[in-house]
Amino acid sequence: MEELDLQNLSETEFIEQYQKTEKDKYEKPSITTDMAIFTVATEKVTDKRKKAEKELQLLLIRRGGHPYKGDWALAGGFMGIDEDLDTAVQRELKEETGVDGVYAEQLYTWSAVDRDPRMRIVSVSYLALVDQEKLPPLQAGDDADEVRWFTVKDQVVEFHDELIGECMRRTEKIKLELISGNTTVSAIVEKVTETEKANTTTSMTIIERQGIAFDHAEIILYSLERLRGKVNYTNIAFNLVGDEFTLPDLQQVYEVILGRELNKVQFRRHVEGMVVDTEKEIKTGAFRPSKLYKYNVSWVYDQWK
């Protein structure tokens, strides 16, 4: 039917005709979600004189089929035809973690033409945070061999700056290591940041990978960058502690996210408006009792403070 004839139809007639003649005219990509699900794990300590350390961990699934069979991938899946992205993510999060209402934030859309060898797939990545205390034992899904929590380690192993005309370019090589027991998977990612006047663009390229499927090393590093950025000015870290917590425990959560130690006095000044004293205490090991706090639900970020 000619375009002019289509426009002379009612809207209902137009949609019916469009679905018959135009809907399948063009190839369409599939839409998936990839979720970087983080928790903070506390090591088990038998020596009462030793303080339990915390680690930032990421949920990975060992692929049971091709492509990348046997490699480890982020949790995720295809969006159903009757779902929106957020609904699909909450469904997947419930399936993978067994927990309802997990914090999930949309990050970025990954659309490289060759990112999946099966077909044209566009993926929307999410950052998800879950308190370790709420997690049931992990179980692998239908298309997975195994599911595990991996300790996250990343470091810049090389970088250099160069000025090209009015453009400042920084090139970094970042080593990503994910460790679970005797299993270690890794990747080297090149990150290029270009700044020309007030315009900054960033791109990442996987240089080498060992055991990490698809472009998921890029997604993981992007998620870490977002998490570290937001922890400085939002309440995002409180998704990784229980309803009640000590200030030393909360500080350790901040430290494992940021990858560095924090000054105790400065940290407590930073969070003082975000916490409320429960007037309860807890004793762990041979240490003196610590006050228990809870999140201050009335806290609002003041960007001008």
Image (cartoon, rainbow, N blue to C red):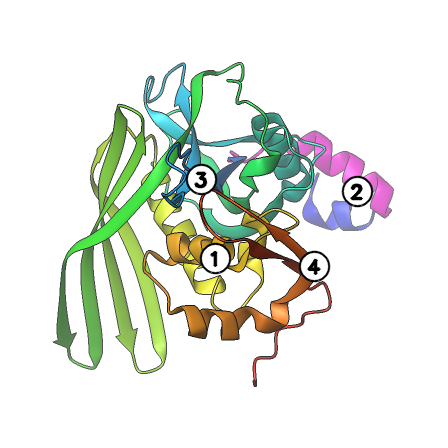
Tag 3–tag 2 contact (CB < 8 Å): no
Amino acid type shown at disc 3: Thr
| Nearer-the-camera pick, 131 or 143 | 131
Q: Which residue was labeled with disc 1?
A: 248
Pointer 4: what residue?
A: 278
Q: Secondary structure at mark 4?
A: strand
**Could you tell me which quadrant the N terminus lies in?**
top right
From the top left corner, tell me how far across and down residue 219 is, in percent. Answer: 39, 45
From this view, report whether residue 4 is shown above or below residue 146.
below
Measuring from the top left, give residue 253's x and y in whole percent.
46, 53
Farthest residue to the bottom: give it.
304
Per the model, the C-alpha gap separating discs 3 and 2 is: 59 Å
Q: Disc 3 or 2, which lies upstream in sequence?
A: 2
Q: CA distance from mark 4 to mark 1?
A: 15 Å
Task: State yes or no: discs 3 and 1 in contact (Cβ < 8 Å).
Answer: no
Residue 272 colored in magenta in the image: no
Using the rendered image of the protein, determine whether residue 270 is visible from the camera's viewpoint. yes
Q: Which residue is mark 2?
A: 14
Which three-letter amino acid code belongs to the residue tagged 1?
Pro
Magenta extent: 10-29
Question: CB atoms at circles 2 and 1 under 8 Å apart?
Answer: no
Q: Is residue 248 left or right of residue 25?
A: left
Q: Identify the residue position indicated by label 3 in the image.
A: 42
Q: Which three-letter amino acid code belongs to the residue tagged 4? A: Thr
x%, y% of residue 272?
58, 72
Q: Is residue 301 left or right of residue 204?
A: right
**Marks 2 and 1, Cα distance to the nearest angstrom?**
63 Å
